């Protein structure tokens, strides 16, 4: 694979602030879809979701979920093999790009940067090929094969809108922890003494 190409950073409001990564095990394609669907439900427009992971890691499956959450047509989402960029209409516009097959020269001329506006949600497979300067505010989603054929996703927020999105999704997908029952106070019941005559 060719080395990543550096492009001028979009929305350069200083250095990106990187949040703590959050990991989740995805036990089936359905769970990958579900993670994507929550992302699609919580995006507010303008988010960049950078999908990073080896062949077959579940990147396109996740984008299908995002489309579903955005009320676009998830079944129409496929790997954009020949056309680099696909656009879907939902609650917000969704742009889906796959940088895998692009040469370094083509990467510099994708036109993808034009989509990085305040409204379009952009999901990019093989985003790492674009290098670190893709967008200063973005959500990195690293997908990897996990033993026993499941997948693992590691999500890292790089910037404020990505952090908001990650917090919203986490609140839905973090395991439920019951709150502790308040301690019960023991009441000692004592029998009233009989009056002795
Ligand atoms: N959590 C999961 N557990 C097991 N299989 C999964 C999971 N998520 C997705 N898959 C399956 O993995 C296969 C590859 O998925 P997908 O096409 O989304 O990967 P990809 O990362 O887009 O691949 P490529 O690198 O070729 O673009 C599909 O058959 C999909 O159903
Ligand atoms: Mg794919």
Image (tube, grey):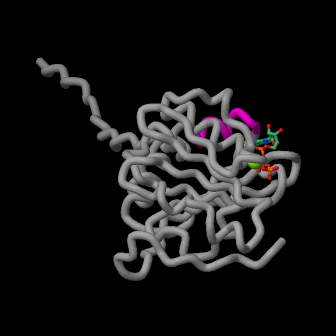
Residue 75 position in % (x across, y down): 67, 27
Based on the displayed image, in which of its 4 quarters is residue 54 positioned? Answer: bottom right
Comparing 175 with 23, the one in front is: 23
Q: Quadrant of the C terminus?
A: top left
Residue 18 image position (x, y, % from top left)? 48, 73
Instruction: Decide: is 45 above or below 90.
Output: below
Magenta span includes 16 = no
Identity of the residue drawn at 50% across and 40% down: 40
Residue 155 visible in image:
no
Q: Position of residue 31 (x, y in %)?
A: 67, 37
Closest to the observer: 144 or 178?
A: 144
Quadrant assignment for the N terminus: bottom right
Instruction: Please give left or right for residue 197 compared with residue 93 in the image.
Output: left
Residue 115 seen in render: yes
- Residue at 48 percent across and 34 percent down: it is 70
Left or right, residue 138 beside residue 13: right
Position of 71 with respect to 99 (left or right) is left
7 over 34 or under it: above or below? below
Query: Residue 120, image x and y in percent?
Result: 44, 48
Q: Which residues are magenta?
A: 28-36
């Amino acid at each position: 694979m060719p080395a990543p190409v550096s492009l001028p950073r979009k929305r350069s409001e200083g250095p990106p602030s990187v949040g703590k990564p959050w990991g989740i095990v995805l036990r089936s394609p359905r769970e990958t879809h579900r993670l994507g669907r929550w992302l699609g439900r919580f995006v507010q427009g303008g988010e960049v979701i950078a999908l990073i992971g080896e062949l077959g890691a579940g990147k396109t499956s996740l984008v299908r979920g995002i489309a579903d959450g955005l009320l676009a047509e998830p079944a129409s989402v496929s790997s954009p093999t020949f056309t680099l960029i696909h656009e879907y209409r939902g609650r917000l516009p969704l742009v889906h790009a796959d940088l895998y097959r692009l040469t370094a020269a083509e990467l510099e001329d994708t036109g993808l940067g034009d989509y990085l506006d305040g409204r379009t949600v952009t999901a990019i497979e093989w985003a790492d090929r674009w290098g670190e300067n893709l967008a200063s505010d973005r959500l990195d989603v690293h997908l990897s094969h996990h033993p026993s054929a499941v997948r693992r996703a590691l999500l890292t927020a790089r910037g404020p809108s990505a952090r908001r999105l990650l917090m919203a999704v986490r609140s839905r997908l973090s395991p439920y922890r019951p709150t502790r029952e308040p301690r019960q106070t023991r009441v000692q019941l004592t029998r009233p003494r009989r009056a002795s005559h």
